[in-house]
Image (tube, rainbow, N blue to C red):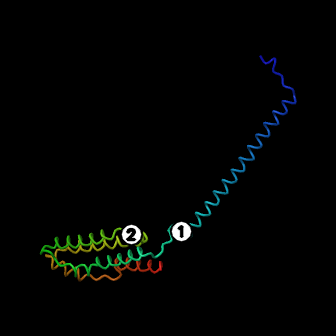
Amino acid sequence: MFSNFTVDWKESLLILLGIVVVVLLFYVFNRKSIVQEKEARKLFKEQMQHNKSVPYINEVKRVATPQTTQAYERLIILMERIDLHKLVTRITPISSLKQDYATFLIQNIDQEYDFNISQQLYVSEEAWALIATAKQTIIQQILKTSLKNDITDANNLQKALLNINETNSVSDLAKNRLKQEFKNLV
């Protein structure tokens, strides 16, 4: 079967040389791609470390457009409208039941918030989180005050809510954050 197959030493040498060349080429090209991959990983790590050291690097640079200006204005107005003292002064009790008044106040807060919910597109996540926290804090104050035993009707609840004195309230913090962000835009 192999009797007709004869290979002289020159052909063997050429075949062996060809195999060596193929192996060397594979090694050289493979080695080059390994080095490139290592360099790419090193560059990626350096960029990630740089991104960690620079705050808000992933945030898109925002500019003051008419829409962003209007959004900041509307959110400041929202914070003013849901401010506990201004809300209670503006909204009078609808019945003598304190639960009805508390529910009515909370519905007004939710309505104001829902009306302005799309404005979160124009402010930072931190500012929007402060606005949401302010809303929840005011609702909790209303509920906590309405649960007091010495408050028997809606008029007493209104007076008690007006007597709450807060310095540096969450709504004030949210307004200050909005003002600061807007100043940075212009």
Q: Which residue ends up furthest to the left in the rendered image?
A: 96
37 over 99 or under it: above or below: above
Number of labels in the image equals 2
Q: Position of residue 75 (x, y in %)?
A: 35, 75
Are dots 1 and 2 in contact, CB under 8 Å?
no
164 over 22 or under it: above or below: below
- Helix, strand or loop at mark 2: helix
Quarter of the figure with residue 109: bottom left
For label 2, the residue is 120
Q: Position of residue 117 (x, y in %)?
A: 34, 68
Foreground of the two, 1 or 142: 1
Quadrant location of the N terminus in the rendered image: top right
Q: Residues within 10 Å of mark 2 (few under 14, many from 20)?
A: some
Which circle marks residue 157 in the picture? none
Q: Position of residue 82 (x, y in %)?
A: 28, 76
- Helix, strand or loop at mark 1: loop
Q: Amino acid at mark 1?
A: Ile
Task: Give the residue drawn at x 26%, y 74%.
Answer: 141
As measured in the structure, the alpha-carbon distance from the residue carrying label 1 to the one carrying label 2 is 20 Å
Task: Give the residue drawn at x 15%, y 79%.
Answer: 155
Q: In the image, 54: left or right of 140?
A: right
Q: Position of residue 179 (x, y in %)?
A: 41, 80
Q: Residues within 10 Å of mark 1 (few under 14, many from 20)?
A: few
Q: In the image, 48: left or right of 86?
A: right
Quarter of the figure with residue 40: bottom right
Task: Give the residue drawn at x 24%, y 72%.
Answer: 108
Task: Give the residue drawn at x 87%, y 30%.
Answer: 10
For label 1, the residue is 57
Q: Amino acid at mark 2?
A: Gln
> First in sequence: mark 1 or mark 2?
1
Quarter of the figure with residue 12: top right
